[in-house]
Image (cartoon, helix red, strand yellow):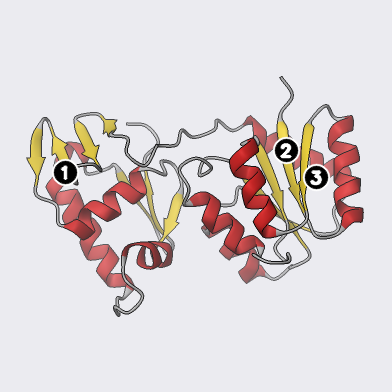
């Protein structure tokens, strides 16, 4: 079955160029010219890959990526930024937010197609429903009861500790920055520093026991990642 690719760009000429070449390679394509439509089509069509510009009408590429990553239905869809924003900081931010690749315009079509093939070869990570229990090894995380069990025994996690554990475990294999965790877990009116996240992670590891201490990996200078497999 042909892989389905969603092309998101506000320039019709770019969309037409990518659409022609992707279809010539045997891919099925979907198109969107603004951020809101991109999110809608991603949720409805569930493409195998999204080619995403940053500078878009309505929601920009950063907002689109964040919203798709925070939706369990779309969090596992690989995203490649294709943009004219060529600063190093933009590239770092894009990759830290969870993009698989960051391509600066202009790029040769041959190189572009090669980068797409490389991303599509990676296994798609499973996503979780909002109410679905997560089981890995002897650890069970149940969002309906706000409880985590290790070897069938309840683990006394605080609400914030549970929120962090569940947020990470729903996105296995993805690097989550400290800033994202702060933005998603804490109220905007509460002043929290990066060190707070580190302390909570340390406590979570202690409570999950030595057999699960490596489930949450530290990505130095960036944030944390929940292991895709154990």
Side of 127 relative to 230 (left or right): right
Side of 116 relative to 40 (left or right): right
**Quadrant in which the C terminus is drawn:** top left
Residue 147, disc: 1
Query: Residue 202, position in %: x, y?
Result: 20, 57
Nearer to us: label 1 or label 3: 1
In this view, the residue farthest toward the top is 1
Residue position marked by numbered label 3 in the rendering: 112
Residue position marked by numbered label 2 in the rendering: 5
Regarding mark 1 in the picture, which secondary structure is present there?
strand
From where the camera sits, is residue 209 visible? yes
- The one of 92 and 42 positioned closer to us in this rendering: 42
Q: Who's the residue at 16% across and 43% down the image?
A: 147
Query: Residue 194, position in %: x, y?
Result: 33, 71
**Quadrant in which the N terminus is drawn:** top right
Of labels 1 and 3, earlier in sequence is 3
Query: Do callouts 3 and 2 mark residues in contact (Cβ within 8 Å)?
Result: no
Query: Do callouts 2 and 1 mark residues in contact (Cβ within 8 Å)?
Result: no
Q: Who's the residue at 48% across and 48% down the image?
A: 71
| C-alpha separation, residue under disc 1 versus residue under disc 3 | 45 Å
- Quarter assignment of residue 220: bottom left
Residue 194, disc: none
Nearer to us: label 3 or label 2: 2
Side of 230 relative to 162 (left or right): right
């Amino acid at each position: 079955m042909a892989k389905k690719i969603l092309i998101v760009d506000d320039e019709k000429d770019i969309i037409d160029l990518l659409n022609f070449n992707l279809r010539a390679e045997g891919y099925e394509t979907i198109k969107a010219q603004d951020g809101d439509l991109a999110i809608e089509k991603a949720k409805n069509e569930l493409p195998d890959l999204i080619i995403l510009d940053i500078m878009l009408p309505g929601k920009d590429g950063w907002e689109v990526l964040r919203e798709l990553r925070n939706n369990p239905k779309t969090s596992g869809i690989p995203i490649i930024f294709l943009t004219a924003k060529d600063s190093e900081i933009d590239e770092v931010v894009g990759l830290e937010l969870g993009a698989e690749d960051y391509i600066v315009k202009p790029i040769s079509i041959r190189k572009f197609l090669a980068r797409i093939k490389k991303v599509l070869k990676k296994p798609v990570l499973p996503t979780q429903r909002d109410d679905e229990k997560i089981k890995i090894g002897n650890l069970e995380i149940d969002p309906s009861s706000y409880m985590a069990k290790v070897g069938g025994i309840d683990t006394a996690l605080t609400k914030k500790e549970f929120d962090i554990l569940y947020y990470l475990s729903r996105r296995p294999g993805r690097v989550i920055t400290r800033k994202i965790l702060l933005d998603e877990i804490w109220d905007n009116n509460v002043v929290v520093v990066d060190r707070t996240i580190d302390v909570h992670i340390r406590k979570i590891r202690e409570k999950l026991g030595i057999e699960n201490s490596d489930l949450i990996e530290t990505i130095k200078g960036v944030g944390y990642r929940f292991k895709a497999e154990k």
